[in-house]
């Protein structure tokens, strides 16, 4: 029950940060900061894909309904969620994930967390901006928005991850 309350709190806090603060920012150069995939990233590693896709759908729809973005966040988060196990398999540690509960820097190290998040956020942002613009003639603009938004989003995801995840207790 304690874990459920923890994830519901993350759902609400990350959702409101994204929908009410970050979606309202106008930075320039097409930059849009998106940190809400962090919620899916912080789900347990052994979480099933079908329940995770359902949670991603609900989370994306809640952000879309507040932000009035007509499914952009939902679609992008579903792509992120679907690719998460594939990316985890590509970047799996030598010993595997057997004794690891969460995908965090404390459990798997900063380097692993950075490369997995970089890969997944890049694909998430590319999908999001491709659907938002939806013209192949604007492919350079899509890449510009993706490449300019990615570092800021990744930095905020890493900062928020250190806030939401407590350091494991030494045994």
Image: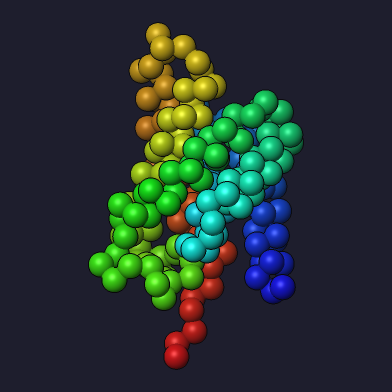
Q: Along the horizontal axis of the image, is 41 left or right of 6?
A: left
Q: Is residue 145 above or below residue 101?
A: above
Q: Is residue 20 above or below residue 30?
A: below
Q: Is residue 153 above or below residue 110?
A: above
Q: Could you tell me residue 58's position as x and y percent? A: 68, 44
Between 2 and 29, the one nearer to me in the picture: 2
Q: Could you tell me residue 7's position as x and y percent? A: 65, 62
Quadrant, the C terminus: bottom left
Between 108 and 143, the one nearer to me in the picture: 108
Where is residue 19, by image quadrant?
top right
Q: Residue at x 37, y 49 (%)?
A: 87
User: Would residue 60 be visible to someone looking at this image?
Assistant: yes
Q: Residue furthest bottom?
A: 171
Q: Residue at x 53, y 60 (%)?
A: 47
Q: Could you tell me residue 75's position as x and y percent? A: 57, 33
Q: Residue at x 69, y 74 (%)?
A: 2
Q: Is residue 69 above or below residue 34?
A: above
User: Would residue 38 be visible to someone looking at this image?
Assistant: no
Q: Could you tell me residue 22's position as x and y percent? A: 61, 40
Between 78 and 109, the one nearer to me in the picture: 78
Quadrant, the N terminus: bottom right
Q: Along the horizontal axis of the image, is 145 left or right of 1?
A: left
Q: Residue at x 46, y 11 (%)?
A: 135
Q: Residue furthest left?
A: 94
Protein image colouring: rainbow
């Amino acid at each position: 029950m304690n874990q459920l309350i923890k994830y519901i709190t993350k759902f609400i806090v990350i959702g409101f940060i994204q929908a009410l603060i970050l979606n309202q920012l106008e930075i320039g150069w097409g930059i849009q900061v998106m940190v809400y995939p962090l919620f899916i990233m912080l789900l347990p590693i052994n979480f099933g894909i079908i329940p995770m896709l359902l949670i991603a759908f609900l989370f994306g729809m809640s952000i879309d309904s507040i932000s009035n973005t007509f499914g952009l966040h939902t679609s992008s988060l579903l792509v992120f969620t679907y690719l998460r196990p594939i990316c985890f398999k590509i970047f799996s540690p030598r010993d595997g994930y057997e004794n690891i509960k969460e995908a965090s820097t404390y459990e798997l190290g900063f380097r692993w967390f950075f490369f997995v998040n970089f890969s997944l956020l890049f694909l998430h942002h590319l999908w999001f901006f491709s659907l938002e613009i939806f013209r192949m003639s604007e492919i350079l603009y899509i890449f510009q928005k993706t490449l300019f938004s990615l570092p800021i989003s990744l930095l905020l995801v890493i900062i928020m991850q250190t806030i939401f995840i407590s350091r494991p207790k030494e045994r």
